[in-house]
Image (cartoon, coloured by chain):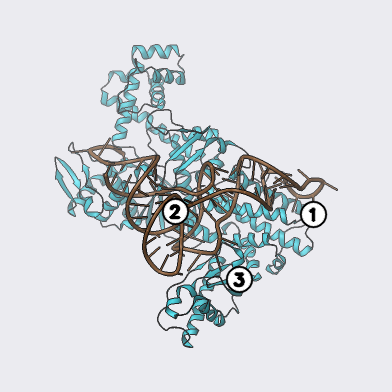
Chain colours: A cyan, B brown
Amino acid sequence: MADLLKLASLQAREIILDSLGRLISLEKAPAEPLPDFIIEIPADKSHGDFAANAAMVSAKAFKLPPRKIAELICEEAILDGTYFEKIEIAGPGFINFFLSKKWFSSIADTVLTEADNYGRTNTGDGKKILVEFVSANPTGPMHIGNARGGAIGDGLAEILDWAGYTVEREFYINDAGNQIEKFGKSLELRYMQLCSKDGLMIIAKCDNQTEAICTAIYNDTEKFPMPEDVYLGMDIIAHAHDYFTEKGNSLSKVSEEERRAALVAFALPKNISVLEKDLGKYRISYNTWFRESILHNDGSVEKVVEMLTERGYTYEQEGAIWFKSSELGDEKDRVLVRANGIPTYFVPDIAYHYNKLVTRGFDKAIDVFGADHHGYIPRMKAALTALGVDAERLDIVIMQMVNLVKDGEKYKLSKRSGKAITLSTLLDEIPIDAARFFFNLREPNSHFDFDLDLAVEKSSQNPVFYVQYAHARICSLIAALRVEGFTLDSYCTEELDVLDKPQEIELLRHLASLPSEIDSAAKTYDPSKVTKYAVELATLFHKFYDACSVKNAETAELKKARLVLCSAVLQTLRNSLSILKIDKPEKM
RNA sequence: GCGCCUUUAACUCAGCUGGAUAGAGUAACUGCCUUCUAAGCAGUAAGCCAUUGGUUCGAGUCCAAUAAGGCGCACCA
């Protein structure tokens, strides 16, 4: 798993350090430690492949102008046996490094040798990471925010895997606690409405058609009133009606509590399997669907309160048990157990994170959350610290809210209204490729307007088509050459020396940067870097395609070299699309 | 009121730990298919990087204040 770009960058650094060391021994440089410098990639390619600011940052220590220092460094620099063919002094004192042909030639070789693994790195060193994402409320369908969370979480998990971590994906099912109570209450109310005289009339009138019944009941708020604190979505009515259709009004005679339990037991598994199905369609599959109820049943929840108490982090006030989170960086203390004896959601959540990091021993846990939960971070970290777990092992990726835009108008997202656009509706309307690509087009932390009209559009405006088009173009190009009997049986890096057009060099340079880009995406938890990489690669390829003919190359050597280049581009494009789980069409 | 996030071209956004003349796409305009897929390419035009101050060789990038917008601030999750 070679990262040629990184190797070259490190080599540039070594050359400078080596040169500085020699200057010190010649007493041309101050003996005290010099400030650290950076090796960067200049925006303007005429400034070389790497630039070092060593001379500028050392100006004070040398008591010389930066350009003079740069001259000294360059005089002592030794390039023999390195990837570089020349260095130059430029601007205010930059030292610019120019890579040799040999380096560029070896890129395609590396790509084709590593093939489907090109881009993978060892940075993660096999450390175990658990990525938890979506974890949508199982009381109802998923919304657009979950769609973004799904694309980001799954992309991130894949990127971490490529960066050498051992990754597991997990969905946390909140199948206990208050919202399940609320779910039961909502189902129960709707069920009883269906069993009522008015309800039976509607059922008869609608010829037992679920959708019509749901709409009728949902809209008639006078005959079928609902309190404030329940779920109003039509899916609730549909569950109640399904139960009614299957088992009649038998539940109307039992106790309210029994009725709720029966309805929850009926509806919850259905909801969970819908979540699984919808996410599967979205190309997400989890290693684990972790149930909150487990933590209640195995005593983990009580144990958390006990452990925090043992460590002196709790106190009682007004009948409730509080956690002294303000001592550990949170803005205020939090209730763990309410005055009525029921723990808040916070306790099972602590137990859950303890389970991830201690019981199951993951080195790191990453949660992908919507921005509306950002206030949760300090208290969760405080809880881990209180339990003696290094809070650094929990990282939370916050993604900002999504606005759906259609015809220039914004949709508001709401789970309660029943009118929110669900994930499955979205996937019916737009291609899955487009959804996954769009949600990873920007970094998680940016506010995002999802333009439905654009995502549906099958045109050049749609970046996912642009990238796929590049892939299809290369495939057909290679196929056309194969018909001529021109294939990639054997190649050697020397053959690539004939590539010297700027479009070819740019392309090679970009190919080399995939491993670094993956490391960077893994480090910053930002899958959009890979998306941007793919778009840039497609752009460079289209430019190359237009400027350089493969089929009608001037010489056979050049033709072969370009075929090698195209094959390497194809491989790299495929790898980036694989990470994003976007289709790779061979024809369009 | 307090906290988190955002503010770069008409629109949507890049800009890597501060670096050399701030970049793409869309929309507008002009060119390029008898030759590997024109879902493409080349070009033109478009900017007080929200405002003000600070840090230094050097600021779109770091710090502070201000403004506008988004999201939070429960014994809800």
Answer with mark 2 or mark 3, whichever residue precedes in sequence: 3
Q: Tell me the CA gap for discs 1 and 2.
A: 45 Å
> Could you say whether the residue bearing mark 3 is in a helix, strand or loop?
strand
Answer with mark 1 or mark 2, whichever residue precedes in sequence: 1
Say whether mark 1 and mark 3 are on the same chain.
Answer: yes
- Between residue A566 and residue A326, name the one nearer to us: A326
Q: For the residue marked with disc 1, what is the amino acid?
A: Glu
Label 2 marks a residue whose chain is A
Question: Which residue is tagged 1?
Answer: A484
Q: For the residue marked with disc 2, what is the amino acid?
A: Tyr
Q: In x, y percent, where is residue B19?
A: 51, 64
- A74 horizontally vs A324: left or right: right
Q: Which label belongs to residue A525?
A: 2
Mark 1 neighbour class, 10 Å CA radius: few under 14, some 14 to 19, many 20 or more: few
Q: Is residue A428 above or below residue A150?
A: above
Q: Tell me the CA gap for discs 3 and 1.
A: 37 Å
> Could you say whether the residue bearing mark 2 is in a helix, strand or loop?
loop
> Could you say whether the residue bearing mark 1 is in a helix, strand or loop?
loop
Q: In x, y percent, where is residue A201?
A: 39, 11
Q: For the residue marked with disc 3, what is the amino acid?
A: Phe
Q: In x, y percent, where is residue A578?
A: 56, 50
Q: Visible in this render: residue A531? A: yes
Residue at image coords 49%, 80%: A20
Label 3 marks a residue whose chain is A
Q: Which label belongs to residue A98?
A: 3
Is the C-beta separation of discs 1 and 2 under 8 Å? no
Quarter in which the C terminus of chain A is drawn? top right
| Residue found at the very far bottom of the displayed protein | A26
- B61 horizontally vs A228: left or right: right
Q: Tell me the CA gap for discs 2 and 3.
A: 31 Å
